């Protein structure tokens, strides 16, 4: 398999993973809002921490894809 094909597959897989993490973050926000309206304040801190960790993980994955793409572009149009 060519390096460009591998990069395309990697890029697609990481984007799907990031999309999944965003959906989980949206679920956490919904749970936090539900807890806030129910006045269950003890739930807010763990959901904020989990959402922050997912945000950092998504950012790290996005940084990896961008740096991989930059390295791939440096190698030129061959393989």
Image (cartoon, helix red, strand yellow):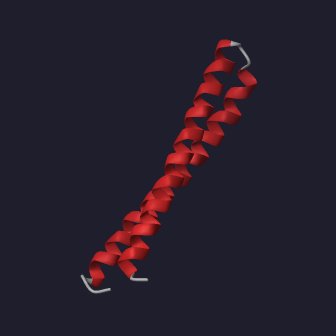
The image shows residue 60, relative to residue 42, as above or below, that is below
**Residue under the image location 54 percent in, 51 percent down:** 56
Is 8 left or right of 55, judged from the image as shown?
A: left
Please tell me how many numbered marks the rendered image carries: 0
Residue found at the very far left of the displayed protein: 77
Residue found at the very far top of the displayed protein: 38
**Residue under the image location 55 percent in, 39 percent down:** 23
Where's the N terminus, which quadrant? bottom left
Query: Splitting the image into 4 quarters, where does residue 32 fall?
Result: top right
The image shows residue 56, relative to residue 36, as above or below, that is below
**Residue under the image location 55 percent in, 47 percent down:** 20
Where's the C terminus, which quadrant? bottom left
Query: Splitting the image into 4 quarters, where does residue 62 fall?
Result: bottom left
The image shows residue 10, relative to residue 59, as above or below, that is below
Q: Where does the image place residue 31, in percent across and percent down from the top left?
A: 65, 26
Residue found at the very far front of the displayed protein: 1
Query: Splitting the image into 4 quarters, where does residue 24 fall?
Result: top right
**Residue under the image location 40 percent in, 72 percent down:** 7
Residue found at the very far bottom of the displayed protein: 78
Q: Where does the image place residue 75, in percent across and percent down from the top left?
A: 29, 84
Is 70 left or right of 14, judged from the image as shown?
A: left
Q: Where does the image place residue 68, in percent across and percent down from the top left?
A: 40, 71
């Amino acid at each position: 398999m060519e390096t460009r094909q591998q990069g395309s597959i990697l890029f697609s897989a990481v984007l799907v993973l990031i999309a999944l993490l965003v959906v989980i973050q949206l679920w956490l926000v919904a749970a936090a809002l539900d807890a806030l309206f129910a006045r269950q304040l003890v739930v807010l801190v763990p959901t904020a921490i989990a959402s922050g960790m997912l945000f950092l993980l998504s950012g790290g994955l996005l940084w990896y894809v961008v740096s991989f793409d930059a390295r791939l572009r440096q190698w030129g149009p061959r393989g």
